[in-house]
Image (cartoon, grey):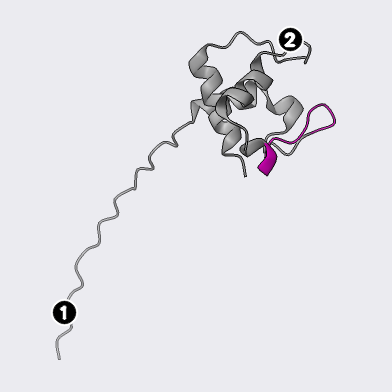
């Protein structure tokens, strides 16, 4: 009996797509994580943000707490309205 030759296998490298970076996550990490933790679980310097109470607040309430309170260290960063909304949306979606 004759054995059939197996076809040659060509190995083609797979290209991995770059991971999309969420600009709101970058803003949160830059301006909020030092006090509120990278996952929003809070630190000695800032309360947890990944709670049902925080998620229940409106965008306007969270924006006011996060950006309109000059008495809270770090809450007076010069962020534009779009950046502020991005951070608030990020906070509202923390698990």
What residue is rendered at 57% in x and 23% in y?
Answer: 60
Tag 2: Cα neighbours inside 10 Å, few (<14), some, or many (≥20)?
A: few
Camera-nearest residue between 78 and 22:
78
- Circle on res. 12: none
Q: CA distance from mark 1 to mark 2?
A: 79 Å
On the image, numbered disc 1 is attached to which residue? 4
The location of residue 48, given as percent across then percent down, is: 74, 36
Stretch of the chain drawn in magenta: 43-53
Question: What secondary structure is found at the residue carrying circle 2?
Answer: loop
Dominant SS in magenta? loop
Give above or below for 11 relative to 44.
Answer: below
On the image, numbered disc 2 is attached to which residue? 70
Camera-nearest residue between 3 and 75:
75
The location of residue 14, given as percent across then percent down, is: 34, 47
Give above or below for 92 relative to 61.
Answer: below
Q: Is residue 52 magenta?
A: yes
Side (left or right) of 12 relative to 16 = left
Image quadrant of residue 79? top right
Tag 1: Cα neighbours inside 10 Å, few (<14), some, or many (≥20)?
A: few
Give above or below for 83 relative to 93.
Answer: above
The location of residue 4, given as percent across then percent down, is: 16, 79
The location of residue 46, given as percent across then percent down, is: 79, 28
- Quadrant of image for the C terminus: top right
The reply to whether the C-beta atoms of the residues labelled 1 and 2 are less than 8 Å apart is no
Camera-nearest residue between 41 and 4:
41
Does residue 25 appear in the picture of this structure?
A: no
Question: What secondary structure is found at the residue carrying circle 1?
Answer: loop
Dot 1 or dot 2, earlier in sequence: 1
What residue is rendered at 70% in x and 15% in y?
Answer: 75
Camera-nearest residue between 68 and 5:
68
What residue is rendered at 78% in x and 32% in y?
Answer: 47
């Amino acid at each position: 009996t004759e054995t059939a030759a197996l076809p040659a296998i060509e190995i083609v490298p797979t290209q991995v797509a770059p991971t999309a970076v969420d600009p709101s996550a970058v803003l949160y990490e830059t301006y909020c994580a030092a006090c509120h933790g990278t996952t929003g679980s809070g630190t000695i310097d800032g309360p947890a943000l990944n709670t049902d109470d925080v998620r229940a607040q409106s965008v306007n309430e969270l924006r006011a707490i996060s950006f309109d309170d000059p008495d809270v260290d770090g809450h007076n960063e010069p962020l534009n309205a779009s950046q502020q909304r991005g951070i608030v949306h990020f906070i509202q979606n923390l698990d």
